[in-house]
Image: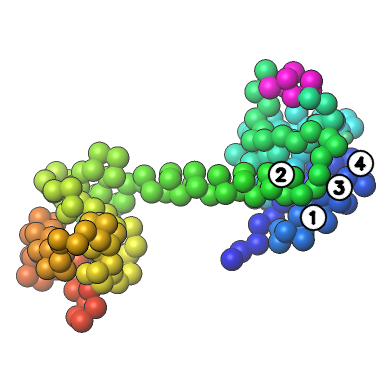
Amino acid sequence: MNEKYILIVEDEPSIAEVVGLYLQRAGYSIQTAADGKQAMNLLERGIPDLVVMDLMLPEIDGLSLTRWLRERSDVPVIMLTARREEIDRIAGLEMGADDYVIKPFSPQELVSRVRAVLRRTKREQAEVEAERALEFEGLLIDPRSRTVTVAASLVELTAKEFDVLYLLARHPRQVFTREQLLERVWGGAEYIDAGTVTVHVRRLREKIERDPSKPVRLLTVWGVGYKFEP
Ligand code: CA
C-alpha cells in the first residue's frame, strides 16, 4: 500500500504538532506549513493526497489559500475552524473544502474525518475510472453508451457480451478463468455453467475479430481461461 501524504497548514504550533502526530500514528506521512506562503511553496512542489487547512492564518487566510489551491487541483481539503459561525459564513462563499472540523476537536476525530474523505475520494476516482471509454487500435468500448465500435462501425452486442468484453478489456493481458467471468458477469448464477462463457467469447470473436478463427484481441489461455490483448 502506498503511503498517503497529508499537508497540514496551521499556524498554531501545538495544534500542528498534535495533528501531525496522530496522522503519522494512523500511517500517513505529513508535512506542515505554518502560514500560507509556506503552504504555497510546498504545494507548488507537489500536490498531497489531502490538505488539513486552518481557516485563520496570518497574511493569507485558509479560505484564500483554498481558492488558490482549487485553481490548481481538486485535492480534498479539511478545514479547521475555531467557530461554528465561521462555517456558516464561509459556507455561503463556497469554500471549496470537503469537510471541516471545529476547534477544539479531538485529534482522533480529525483522523476519522481524514480517513472518510480519502475513502470517498478514492471511490469517486474509481467511479470516474470505471466509466472511462476504452480505446484500442480499431476498437472503441464505451461503457456510458454501452456501445462497441470496430473499425469505425458500430457492433451490436448483447448485454452479457458487452460485460464480458468490457471486463476483459479493462484488465488487459490479465487472465480470467471461466469461473471468474461467470462470477463477475453473471453474479455466479447457479443455472449458468462455464460453457456459457465459451459461447459468449465465441460470439464476441465473431463480432469484433477480423478473423474469428485467429483472434488477436480475445485470446484463449489454454487450460486457464481468457485474456484481452490490447
Ligand atoms: Ca490559526
Residue 197, image x, y percentages: 16, 64
Which residues fall within the magenta stretch?
A: 85-91
Gap in Å between the C-alphas at discs 2 and 3?
12 Å
Q: Are marks 1 and 2 in contact (CB under 8 Å)?
A: no
Disc nearest the viewer among 1 and 4 = 1
Q: Which image quarter is the N terminus in?
A: bottom right
- Lower position in the chain sequence, tag 4 or tag 2: 4
Q: Of helix, strand and loop, which one carries label 1?
A: helix
Q: Circle 3: is it few (<14), some (14-19), or many (20+) Cα within 10 Å?
A: some
From where the camera sits, is residue 227 visible?
no
**Residue 182 horizontal/vertical position (percent):** 23, 63
Mark 1 or mark 4, earlier in chain: 4
Give the CA distance from mark 1 to mark 4: 16 Å
Q: Are marks 4 and 3 in contact (CB under 8 Å)?
A: yes
Q: Amino acid at mark 3?
A: Ala
Relative side of 148 to 120, left or right: left
Asked if residue 31 is among those painted magenta in the image, a careful observer would answer: no
Question: Quick check: marks 1 and 4 in contact, CB under 8 Å?
Answer: no
Residue matched to label 3: 16
